[in-house]
Image (cartoon, rainbow, N blue to C red):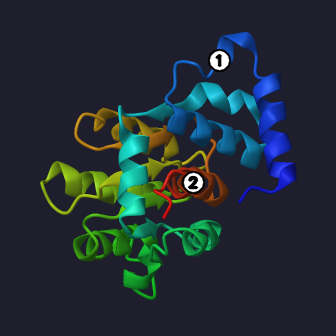
Amino acid sequence: MDHPIFSESIRRIRQSLPAEASLGQLTAVEQEVVLRLIHSSGDLSLVKDVRFTPGACEAGVALLAAGAPLLTDTAMAAAAVAPMARRTFGNPVQSVLEWAPSSPPPGSTRTAAGMAPALRELPGAVVLIGSAPTALDVLLELVASGDAAPALVIGMPVGFVGVAESKARLSAAAAVLPQIRLEGSRGGAGLVGAAANALLRHGWLARPQP
């Protein structure tokens, strides 16, 4: 399944990580997520900023293997994960923009406006947020109110406006919301897609063989 260049890249990443950034304290699936994030970003320092709630990756693998939908904040994130989903478990991949109005509401964004109706229709989804802290804020408000909640959030909005605050709120919800989170200003569609692809790949390779 893996291209030789990818396999060699992962080997070199493991070799290049400094001793203090050992992956040994992570589970096998968590290690795969971190390695794929580094591979996708080219940034070895990212290893220190990835956070997992206990069991989130393992639960994500099980959910995706059972066909859970993937819900993304942008079309770019959907495009980043759709090919792997097709090659593995055939999970449906949709963007919250499919539920969004054609124009953003005053003071908000289309992704934020689409999040609530999308989650209510797909409450057991694995949610990928790589670009829109506003959408993450709406998701967290829904969870806090006891409304529709996702099964797992991969929260990696990128940028400098509202990002630190939304990631802090996501961290504060860790006790009730399984999550994979990237601290700091880094993130983006490619990275949330990489994290989800790592879960899909792990589940596909570990599936029972006929």
Numbered disc total: 2
Q: Position of residue 132 (x, y in %)?
A: 50, 59
Tag 1's secondary structure?
loop
Q: Position of residue 204 (x, y in %)?
A: 53, 58
Task: Give the image quarter of residue 136.
Answer: bottom left
Q: Position of residue 95 (x, y in %)?
A: 47, 75
Callout 1: 10 Å neighbours few (<14), some, many (20+)? Answer: few
Q: Say which residue label 2 marks.
A: 205
- Residue drawn 35% across and 47% down? 59
Judge from the rendering whether residue 202 lies leftward or rightward of residue 46; answer left or right: left
Q: Which amino acid does label 2 sit on?
A: Leu
Q: Which of marks 2 and 1 precedes in the sequence?
A: 1
Q: Is residue 185 visible?
A: no
- Residue farthest to the top, as pictured: 20
Q: Which of 36 and 104 is in front in this view?
A: 36
25 relative to 11, above or below: above
- Residue drawn 66% across and 17% down? 21
Q: Say which residue label 1 marks.
A: 22
Callout 2: 10 Å neighbours few (<14), some, many (20+)? Answer: few
